[in-house]
Amino acid sequence: MTRFLALIGPHRTLLVFAIVSGIAHHLVVLASAGTGAWVVSRAITGQEFTGGLILLGVLLPFVALTPWLESYLAHVAAFRVLADIRGRIYAAFERLAPGYLLERRSGDLGAAAISDVEQLELWFAHTLSPLVSAATVPVAALTALGTFDPALAGALAPALVLLATVPSWLRQKAEAQGTELRAQVGELNAEAVDTLQGLRELVTSGAGPRQIGRFRGLEAKLLGAKLAHARRSGLEHGVTNALTVFGLLAVLVTAALLVTRGALDPALFPVAVVLAATTFAPVIAVTDVARDVNLVVAAGRRIMTILDTEPPVRDRVTDFSGDITPRVVFDTVRFRYAPALPDAVADATFTVEPGETVALVGHSGAGKSTCASLLMRFWDVADGAITIGGHDIRDLPQDHLRKLITLVPQDVYLFNIPLKDNIRLGRPEATDAEVVAAAEAALAEEFITGLPDGYDTIPGELGARLSGGQRQRIAIARALLKDAPILIMDEAVSNLDAESEQEVTQAMAQVRAGRTTLVIAHRLSTIRTADRVVMLDDGRTITTGTHDDLLSGNAGYRRLLAGQVAGVE
């Protein structure tokens, strides 16, 4: 958890004041309790106690003020630190995308970004300040008891030391339980997300009961983890109570013996007992929280796993200036997703000239989508190079590269925000007039204005309220508005009916005009519109040429088209 202390940064002052307020609270309570006991003792013996009442009047307002101040400052600091940590996690997601995100379930990552971060509140808002108080306040109490008689401090000290060490007794078991519990929560969240996203398929296939069975199995594992945590926590709670009682009895007996022997003023007897009882409060507060710190540690480790993961690509340079000609060259590119896997791209060599549209074709697994991902630098090539305008893309900052390229995917993701904001995703500063112009060029204006809320329409989660053709035209409008010189299109019409395909094809012609375009093509209608065709097989460039040339001179190309046409029909 000390690594998270480094993230406090600008919020350190708030936490320091919270800690000071917490220490002040316990010291004021200690002084008030001791003074109250002294007043009662003096009153019983018929002695003057006016000064004690005045002191109590001064102390009591601080008894109410200091805990409020501690809680407020600690929570404000904690919430700000948690916001910073979430920002770091989201930045890590962007840095690691898409490779790392493909290896983890989205629900589990969501749990890390939300639930695990929330667990850290226990550390920043409820543990740090009590921990410091537990280390300082007992020293003050032992010092006060020692002024009455050293034997009183000696009687209380062993119980305090043992009480402070209780969380460490079962530390390894606690950490293992915390790790298991957070893992089970992440697994259950992941399964819930999968179920919601695949609800239609579950209903239509009648697989709902089986999925409920999976949920019950995961719930049983989570319940087991929670019960194990509860048993250990209950044991620590019982030991804490026993040590508290032992400490109080030790002071009570010692004080009674001292009074009997005349070594302690009888008026200080109740003061000593009350001081001893009050001293346990900050230590018990820490031990109560410490029983759940294992969950915080486990959550912290999951978060740090994300933050510490090395990104698949790193910028060689941090700045780049000057214009770049949008000429894309793949020069003997080789790449594999993991050392144990075969090459996804073995020898890809082709060029896309400025303003030219090149269609990448090939059987499934030929390396078409991988080439597009490498151009966007989701991963770095193992051998060879990809250049834009003669510059190796590894020598371009990723932010600069992203500005040069825009993607129209096959499966369009729409955020649950107004359509106009979905369109301006790549250019958030674009005006409403520019958004409308892009929608008109993408042939989306008519259907958008026909919606009840027009451009303010919320498309629903994953764009569920729009048809496939409508979602594609929103994606094309995005690309038009971003106006990047290089365009990647992942067969935007492959999942559409004939009418929608015709509309989207017209919109695609608009967005491709004047841009260097790489199309991952499956349908013959798309391939025909390309200036050139590059055929891949097992990650290698087999042949290149115009559609007509390849159709007349390459038997493999004809077989590929025949198979794709048969699949479409």
Image (cartoon, rainbow, N blue to C red):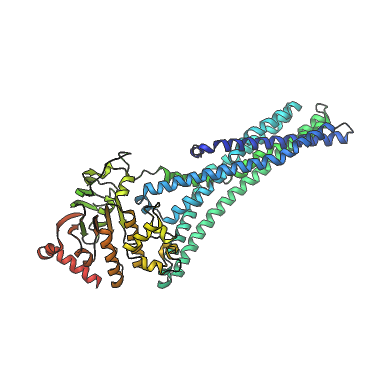
Q: Residue furthest right?
A: 46
**Camera-side residue: 281 or 256?**
281
Q: Residue furthest front?
A: 433
Q: Residue furthest left?
A: 553
Point out residue 33 in the picture as x, y percentages from the top left corner: 76, 37
Q: Residue at x 9, y 63 (%)?
A: 553
Q: Residue at x 31, y 54 (%)?
A: 483
Work out whether 339 lies above or below 32: below
**Camera-side residue: 451 or 273?**
451
Point out residue 504 in the picture as x, y percentages from the top left corner: 30, 66
Q: Would residue 201 appear left or right of 384 to someone viewing this image?
A: right
Work out whether 87 lies above or below 201: above
Work out whether 142 lies above or below 500: above
Point out residue 26 in the picture as x, y percentages from the top left corner: 68, 37
Q: Would residue 428 appear left or right of 336 to someone viewing this image?
A: right
Rendered image quadrant of residue 289: top right
Residue 526 can be seen, yes or no: yes
Residue 174 can be seen, yes or no: no
Point out residue 525 in the picture as x, y percentages from the top left corner: 22, 67
The count of marks equals: 0
Rendered image quadrant of residue 464: bottom left
Q: Residue at x 62, y 41 (%)?
A: 286
Image quarter in which the C terminus is found: bottom left
Q: Would residue 304 appear left or right of 319 to someone viewing this image?
A: right
Rendered image quadrant of residue 435: bottom left
**Camera-side residue: 472 or 334?**
472
Work out whether 232 lies above or below 1: below
